[in-house]
Amino acid sequence: MPDNLSPAAAPWFELPDHALLALEGPDSTAFAHAQFANDVAALAAGHWQWNAWLTPKGRVIALFALLKRAEDRLLLLLPDADPATMQEQLQRFVFRRKVQVFRPPGLQVSAAFSAPVSAAGARIGLAGDAIELDYGDGSEARSLRIAATAEAPAGTTGIDRWRASDLRHGLPRLGAAQREQWTPQQLSLERLNAFSVKKGCYPGQEIVARTHFLGKAKRGLALFQANAVVAPGTDISDGQQVLGKVLCVAEGTGGAVLLAVLPSDRGNATLRAQERVLGELPLMDGLQR
């Protein structure tokens, strides 16, 4: 089946593990720029970027798509994160800034393996009343929509395939147990252009900048396939010692694909998780924005 299907040709399915959080008000951009790891001020209106919120120690709390609909209207698309918890945590830092942090009511997130109608790369598109994002990589077309009504779900097959594609492109899907555990460099977020080392201060900025400029990122993401699902958090061993951990997993036909955090200089030894041999795969490019 060709990848460049028209939007009507590919079935749409809801992404129930994706949530939304809105920032609105005159200080929205300034607030987000000060809190998040990427350069929100430099992002043009009508465009989106990958971004992250970090602890003061530089650990990733949440990884998300940030949509700048206008200078005073931002939308955070949160895969796997709890929007209520993040809303409460962000609200603590508003102080006197003129910004409202809220969960927009009545919106759903859906996706399809088809080309977007008008979105392209980092440019946000519109498809009728829906906000549209281009998740394609030039070889596989993927579209995501945010709308008041979701398209008809296509079952879990589409969801599993979408998650697997995220992982193959090096987009970490952080479950609750994996939050506040890893730095942006350990998650290889530079592949997504998801953080900045040139902008001003933000939580965790000192750790991120020091790691970048001193070249001390000794761990990063690696992609593997296994013949069965392996639980996130599982140790990965070379038979002699534990080298790292499974970060996230996507189930597929005949097995699973998984992202792991491992040393960059781990060598060529056969790796195992839960006694299952892991076959390494190359990470795909094309999802950076």
Image (spheres, rainbow, N blue to C red):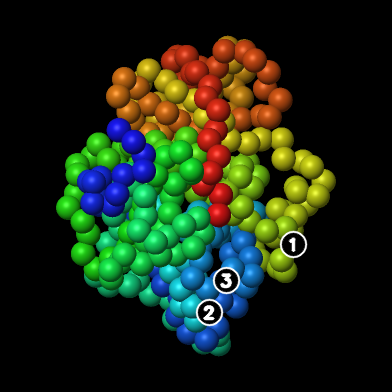
Left or right: residue 242 versus residue 103 is: right
Which-is-in-front pick, marks 1 and 2?
A: 2
The earlier-in-sequence mark between 3 and 2 is: 3
In this view of the protein, which residue sits in the foreground, 24 or 281? 281
Q: Secondary structure at mark 3?
A: loop
Q: Amino acid at mark 1?
A: Lys
Q: Amino acid at mark 2?
A: Glu
Q: Residues under labels 3 and 2: Cα distance? A: 8 Å
Which-is-in-front pick, marks 3 and 2?
A: 3
Disc 3 target residue: 44
Which-is-in-front pick, marks 1 and 3?
A: 3
Left or right: residue 183 versus residue 153 is: right
Is residue 170 visible to us here? Answer: no
Is residue 215 visible to us here? Answer: yes
Q: Residue at x 48, y 43 (%)?
A: 138
Graded by Cα atoms within 10 Å as few (under 14), some (14 to 19) or many (20 or more), the crowding at tag 3 reads some
Q: Are marks 1 and 3 in contact (CB under 8 Å)?
A: no
Q: Residues under labels 1 and 2: Cα distance? A: 21 Å
Q: Residues under labels 1 and 3: Cα distance? A: 17 Å
Q: Are marks 3 and 2 in contact (CB under 8 Å)?
A: no
Q: Secondary structure at mark 2?
A: loop
Disc 1 target residue: 198
Q: Amino acid at mark 3?
A: Ala
Tell me: residue 237, above or below residue 156.
above
Report the quarter where the C terminus lies. bottom right
